[in-house]
């Protein structure tokens, strides 16, 4: 799937693009069921909240054929190839599960600042493309984005790295305040199957979830192949080192798993 001129302009100017109903309910049901299964596994790539509820499952293409297919899906891969004019590879791939009642915050940060400093990514030629697995409401810890903040490039960050998740360089409160005065703040909400793309330099974060509505989002961080990381310092599941261009699957690839998902 290719983006049209207006969508490309929105991404360039605002740093994000939201497309509701991008995957069908049947596709989402297959993905959701599989994500529930993955969070029962005990693996180093699966992180839990303090109380043991699911937090993030990284590198899901390595242990799930269904998520491998999603990571090669043309509706996710083609827009990024279109933007960069070359093949892209998976830099990071995760499902973030913000559990009902206890789902914790993600501090304000820029992804590219982390990819540059921790992984040695030369240029901001990488973006996040995500799919909602649950309905995202204004109240169950939606991802919040500061529009236009990507235009500032890599911002000075807090280097202490301690967060409620894996170590990340975060943004100081005064920077967030200034950027929000300039660009406002928005949180895309919508049905399962909605898709969100956002620039690697866009400042984002999310608050806790004290509602009875869980909020699972899948994130692919796709990097242009020529922009492969030069100095990886983190666990491989946080910054992959298979720099070969993604080989795409057919558009109906998720639906091929319908019988498996029903079993
Ligand atoms: O899922 C969220 O709310 C935020 C996730 C995020 O920013 C990250 O994993 O880098």
Image (spheres, rainbow, N blue to C red):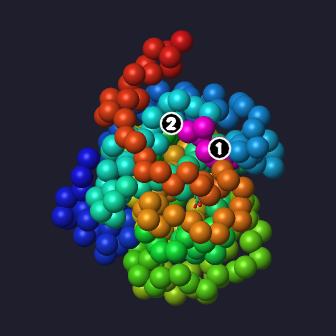
Q: Does 234 sit left or right of 145 as displayed?
A: right
Q: Residue at x 71, y 61 (%)?
A: 234
- Check if residue 31 falls in the magenta segment: no
Label 2 CB less than 8 angstroms from ligand 1: no
Q: Label 2's element?
A: helix
Labelled disc at residue 68? 2
Residue 36 in picture, x, y percent from top left = 61, 31
Residue segment shown in magenta: 55-62
Q: Which residue is mark 1?
A: 57
Pointer 2 with pointer 1, Cβ within 8 A: no
Distance in Å between CA atoms under marks 2 and 1: 13 Å
Above-or-below relation of 151 to 106: below
Above-or-below relation of 252 to 47: above
Q: Label 1's element?
A: strand
Residue 179 in picture, x, y percent from top left = 49, 83
Q: Residues within 10 Å of mark 2 (few under 14, many from 20)?
A: some
Nearer the observer, 137 or 13:
13
Q: Quadrant of residue 160?
A: bottom right
Q: Residues within 10 Å of mark 1 (few under 14, many from 20)?
A: many
Q: Residue at x 26, y 47 (%)?
A: 1
**Which of the marked residues, 2 or 1, is nearer the chain's N terminus?**
1
Q: Quadrant of residue 188?
A: bottom left
| Res 177 seen here | no
Nearer the observer, 97 or 68:
68
Above-or-below relation of 51 to 139: above
């Amino acid at each position: 799937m290719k983006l049209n001129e207006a969508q490309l302009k929105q991404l360039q100017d605002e740093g994000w693009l939201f497309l509701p109903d991008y995957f069908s309910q049947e596709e989402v049901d297959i993905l959701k069921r599989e994500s529930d299964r993955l969070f029962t596994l005990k693996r180093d790539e699966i992180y839990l909240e303090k109380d043991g509820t699911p937090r993030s499952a990284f590198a899901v293409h390595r242990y799930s054929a269904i998520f491998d297919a999603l990571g090669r899906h043309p509706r996710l891969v083609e827009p990024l190839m279109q933007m960069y004019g070359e093949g892209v590879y998976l830099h990071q791939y995760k499902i973030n599960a913000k559990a009902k009642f206890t789902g914790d915050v993600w501090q304000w940060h820029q992804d590219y600042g982390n990819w540059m400093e921790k992984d040695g990514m030369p240029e901001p030629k990488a973006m996040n493309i995500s799919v909602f697995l649950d309905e995202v409401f204004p109240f169950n810890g939606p991802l919040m984005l500061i529009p236009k903040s990507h235009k500032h490039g890599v911002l000075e960050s807090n280097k202490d790295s301690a967060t409620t998740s894996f170590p990340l360089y975060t943004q100081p409160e005064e920077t967030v305040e200034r950027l929000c005065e300039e660009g406002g703040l928005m949180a895309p909400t919508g049905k399962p199957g909605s898709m969100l793309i956002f620039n690697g330099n866009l400042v984002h974060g999310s608050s806790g979830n004290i509602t009875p509505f869980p909020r699972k989002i899948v994130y692919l961080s796709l990097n242009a192949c020529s922009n492969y990381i030069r100095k990886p310092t983190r666990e491989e599941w946080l910054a992959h080192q298979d720099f070969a261009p993604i080989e795409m699957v057919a558009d109906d690839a998720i639906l091929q798993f319908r019988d498996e998902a029903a079993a």
